[in-house]
Amino acid sequence: MSWVLDNLDLIWGLSLDHLRQSLIAIVLGFVISVPIGWAAFRYTAVRGPTLATVGLLYTIPSLGLFAVLAAVFGIPLLSEANLVVALTIYAVAIMTRSVTDGLASVDPVTREAAVAVGFGAWRRFWTVDFPLAGPVLLAGLRVTASSTISLATVGILIGVQNLGYLFTNGSQRRIIPEVLAGVVAVVVIAVVIDLLLVVAGRLLMPWNRRRPTRAERALQAVTA
C-alpha cells in the first residue's frame, strides 16, 4: 500500500495514457466496423467470408501484428501509433459481427414499413435500422471496449507507456503492489467505461428499457 501511495502521480499519468490509447482505438474500430458490418448484412453472398476473414484478425498475435504493421505500412515499430492501429484492428474484428447481427435483428416488417412511407436507403439506415439495432450494437461495443482496454497493456512491449509499465516494471523489480496497482487500474477503467456505455445506451435508446412483466402489470393494475 505504501508503494501505491508514494506513486499515485505515476499511476494517474499512466492511466490517462492508457485511457486515451484505448478510446481512440474503440472509436475508430466502431466507425470502421459499421460499413463492413453493413456490407456483410446487405450482401449475403459475401457475409460468411467477410465475417470469417474479419474474425481471423483477432487471432493474430499482437507482437506479430506490430511487426507486420511496421513492415507493410511503414508505421514506426516502437510507437503509440502502432499500438493504436493494432488495437483498432482487434476492435474491428470483434465489432463487425455485432453490427451485422444487430442489423439482422431489425424486424423486416418495420423495415418494409419505412420503405412504404418513402424512406430512402440512407435515411432508412440512420433513422430505422441503426437505432433499432442499437441494443445489439451496444452489447458488442461493451465487449469491444473491455477487450481493448485489457489488450492495450501489451503496448509496453514495444515501448509505449501505459498501465502495462506497472506489470513489467513490478515483475522485474518484484514489487507486487505495483503489479496489483496496474491490474486494479485496468479493471477500474474497464468498469467505468462499461458503466458509461450502459448509461449512454439508456439515454439514447429509451425504447429498450425493460418492459414490466405480466405479473408486474397485474400488480400495478390492482394497486391502482
Image: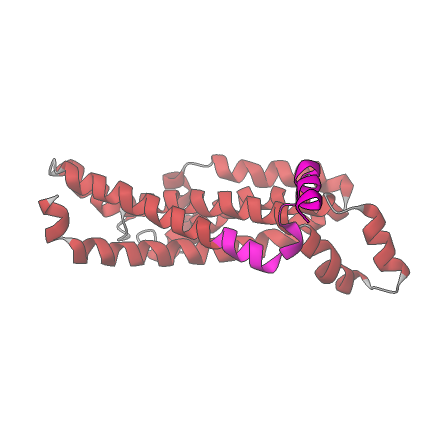
User: In the depicted view, which residue is nearer to us: 67 or 43?
Assistant: 43
Would you place residue 120 above or below residue 133 in this image?
Answer: below
In percent of width and height, residue 67 lies at 38, 45
Look at the image and tell me whether residue 103 can be seen. yes
Front-most of residues 34 and 64: 34
Q: Which residues are magenta?
A: 197-224
Q: Residue at x 28, y 52 (%)?
A: 160
Q: Main secondary structure of the magenta part?
A: helix
Q: Is residue 116 above or below residue 158?
A: below
Residue 44, horizontal then vertical, whole percent: 77, 41
Q: Nearer the viewer, residue 43 or 133?
A: 133
**Residue beneath the point at 68% across and 36% down:** 215
The residue located at (14%, 53%) in the rendering is 7
- Residue 186 lies, in percent from the top left, at 32, 45
Query: How many numbered circles are shown?
Result: 0
**Image quarter in which the N terminus is found:** top left
Residue 93's image quarter?
top right
